[in-house]
Amino acid sequence: MRIYVCVKHVPDTAANIKIVSDTGYDKEVKYVPNPYDEYGVEEAITLVEKAGQGEIIALCVGNESSANSLKSVMAMGVHRSILVKTDEQLLDSARIAKALAKAIAQDEAPDLIFMGKQSVDSEGMQTPYRLGAELGLPVVTGVVDFSMEGSIAKVQREIGGGARETSTIKTPCIIGATKGLNEPRFPKLPAILKAKKKEIKVIDMSTLEIADDSQYRLKNLEPVEERSNARILEGSTQEIVDSLVKILREEEKVI
Amino acid sequence: MSKIGVFIETADQAIKKSVPGVISAALQGGEVVGFVLDGLAEKYRESLGEYGVTELVSLSAANIDFSKQPEAAGRALAEGAKAFGITSLIGVSSPIGNDLLARAAMELKASLTLDCLQVNFQENYAKKSHFSGKAIATFEMGTGLHVIGIRPNSFDAVQNPVDCRVIDHDLDLPSGDAIEIISVDKAGTGQKELTEASIIITGGRPMGSKENFKLLDECANTMDAAVGASRAAVDAGYAPHSMQVGQTGKIVSPKLYIGCGLSGSVQHFAGMKTSDVIVAINTDKDAPIFTKSDYGIIGDLFEVVPALTKALKE
């Protein structure tokens, strides 16, 4: 069994993002492996552990420091990594998917591909579908439960209001993971040290000859202004509640 | 005049609540053609006409049940968009909406923007959240076909009555899809869908137990609200993940959001900061949530919430 896991190197969700140009941000923030991708990594590792055999390869499209995210997932148990190197920030999903597809094509044939259902930086929610289109593989995203029955994968996803949908997918396939699938492990020190010796193959993105033919462009990035301090309602509980109801009904007109 | 296609998402033989808002958003761009996948176009015709859908296309294919074959459903939307000369295809960014819109976009080799907060067809741009809601990105859509998902509640539904005509459109689609939906478990339902709710009341870790969430249910019932939970409350086992609001849960955008016992983490706000009005209830006057809400109540949720329920009943 050969499983590829796609991992994006993203700013920590708690990081303060400083927009520095029309479409760029200050990269001097803490970066982590995309949290949704970690669910995919954990699932791949669990599958290989259960099967007692298999290889897990992590793929990342990003700058040089993305190697840190690859080291993190190798410490979790991924065997080796491929980094498609580029200095561009906020690449569009179409080009990321093309780069991932070419990197896989240069490597081996996948049995399964895991990735997060979305990244926490550009929140595009579409790289799994785009990779599926590039490789001609079926895709299910938002997966909260995964199992294999022979060559068929069985997955569940939440479809709103607490309902869960179960589907079967022929493999090889692409799974977009989300919270609920598992609890990603925290690597221990020996695993972290061992991961430093694992291979990261670097491919320069420019050598993959990926056409930038999209007319679709990120034009502008602007910070969202936070609300300023809340208007604190004062008085007895009864007074507070009465004034809140009055405000919501008469001023805000939301109830 | 441009033709905008709207995926009319339905569930249990009813139009999803967020669809009319999407129709209103689409109308700024031109004539609206609706696409229905469940064969019940005639049933929806009148109510969709109220919002401005002039043509309602009922897509079907022999031997294919779109509710069980998402790949075929995406292909059908793409074929429909091509057959009716659609320039943009838009729908609700719900779990099913996102899935089918993405599949249609791949078939159409179109650009795709999901979870949009704004779309402007005249100036040809769409806006969406980046970095957990800390930034807004504006995308130029170009002249090619684009597929757009709209975050529920981002557009108000405006009535715009027109005559709506149903068109049956039969497709010849390949069989043998790789994905098959084998069951839908509604055991966890009964919860009101968070992403569609106009009012949400959410409990954090201080709720203390699953039972205590009933306090929020009672309050929610007085104003047709949905009940949410913070990640901490879900991780503590007080509520299922399907109720989680935030970065790794549901992204919601209600008119009113009442947070009870929430600290106000960046990750939680990533899921609800586009709410119109945010009210925070917390015993800790220094809780960060008070710096980013509209109204604050420094007090114990176990006193404030029952009092609020009572006041709302009156």
Image: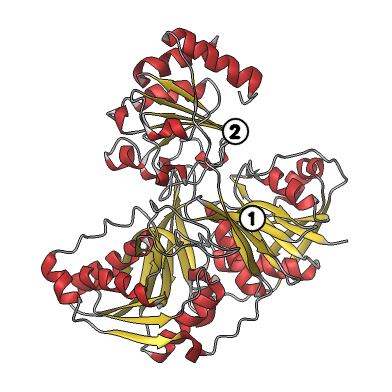
**Residue A210 in the image: above or below residue B301:** below
Q: Which one is nearer the viewer's eye here, A142 or A253?
A: A253
Left or right position of A75 against B16: left
Spot occupied by residue A102 in the image (x, y as percentages of width and height): 46, 86
Spot occupied by residue A71 in the image (x, y as percentages of width and height): 26, 73
x 75%, y 61%: residue: B124
Q: Residue under label 2, please give it.
A: B255
Q: Residue under label 1, please give it.
A: B127
Q: Is residue B37 visible?
A: no
* Amino acid identity at mark 2: Lys
Image quadrant assignment for residue A95: bottom right
Q: Marks 1 and 2, Cα distance to the nearest angstrom?
A: 19 Å
**Residue B274 in the image: above or below residue A237:** below
Which image quarter is the N terminus of chain B in? bottom right
**Residue B24 in the image: above or below residue A75:** above
x 71%, y 43%: residue: B20
Spot occupied by residue A28 in the image (x, y as percentages of width and height): 40, 63
